[in-house]
Image (cartoon, rainbow, N blue to C red):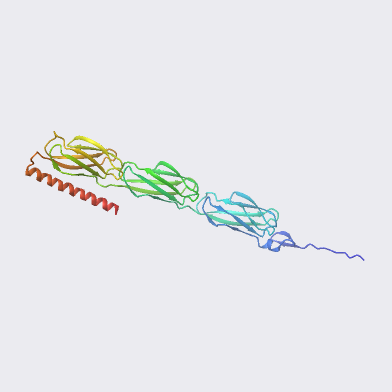
Amino acid sequence: MKTLKIFTIAVVVCAGFVVPAFQSLAQAKSSYILLSKYYVFPEEQVTVRGYGFGRNELVEVRVGTMTQIAQADARGNFVSPHFVVPFQDINSTLNILAQGRISGIRETAKLVVGSFYPQVVPSSYFVKPGGSVSFTGRNFAPNEEVRVERQGNFFMLAKTNSSGGFVARELDLPYREGILDYSFIGQNSKTQARVTLKFDDTVPFLLLNKYFGNPGTQLQLTGHGFGVQERVEIFFEGQFLGSTVSRPEGIFVFATEIPLLGPRGQGMFFAHGLDTNRTARAWFTVTSPNPTESELTASLGQSLDTISKTLRSLLQLLNQNF
């Protein structure tokens, strides 16, 4: 007598579709996806991991409008290729969908696209006319161009690195007074940082190594508070004596002598910066070979006045720096 063997294939109805019994019940009930990050910045990478999908099936993974295909393993788990988060509105959500092509399993998730908070720091907030400044930026989008504007006009482009940072070195400053505004605008992230620089407004002053003497007396003039490497013209009682160029700290030294045919008595040295239009004055008493007491007294009084003005300028400079 032959024995008839009957094999029965059981089915489980779950979530609207039929799952063969040889497929794990956990796969039907316990599928889910996880994201490598749930709060991201544009241009960051995100990976999707899936669990409980069909064995060895292809899974279509969508991040926003982007699609990748992942391969599930024998346990129904997968890891997607990297997605690069696109630029979109601040604090907006990005929908994630993973769907098995055979099992039909469908899982969703959301991530939030955050905003960049860029920062730019100058090498100094207090600068000299005609000098230079460097900027260090961070927290921009990775590998984006940053438009740099000065006083509202295009100045240059900077490029961020993979970390969203950049360095712009030794940018020339104009010869001017007051303040200078810079804007740094990320061309992809659309974020912006601003920096305001203040020009050194020290009152220029002029020092002499002596304040009275005969015609032909050799003198050394030292000027302070001018622009960086600025050409400065020197006059005595309206007579042009020559010009010189200031050092990077805005100081110049000029050697000259009292004109032989100039007037006697008190005369004025005048220094004029051609770029900043800054001026400084100092007085010198031209004496006869045998100066009178009144000439010496006048010269001494003027010397004390010049020293007093110089001290006031120095105090102003110290107050600005501290």
Rendered residue at 10%/44% (across/down): 296
Q: Nearer the viewer, residue 45 or 169?
A: 169
Rendered residue at 24%/43% (across/down): 223
Residue 37 location (% of width, % of height): 55, 57
Image quarter where the N terminus lies is bottom right
Q: Nearer the viewer, residue 276 or 215?
A: 215
Residue that lies at the very extreme toward the right in this rendered image: 1
Q: Is residue 137 above or below residue 24?
A: above
Q: Is residue 123 above or below residue 53?
A: above
Residue 268 image-quadrant placement: top left
Rendered residue at 21%/39% (across/down): 255
Residue 227 image-quadrant placement: top left
Residue 217 image-quadrant placement: top left
Image quarter where the C terminus lies is bottom left
Q: Nearer the viewer, residue 241 or 151?
A: 241
Residue 40 location (% of width, % of height): 53, 54
Residue that lies at the very extreme toward the top in this rendered image: 261
Residue 154 location (% of width, % of height): 41, 41
Q: How many marks?
A: 0
Residue 247 location (% of width, % of height): 29, 43
Residue 215 as seen in the image, left or right of residue 197: left
Rendered residue at 36%/48% (across/down): 196
Q: Nearer the viewer, residue 77 or 93?
A: 77
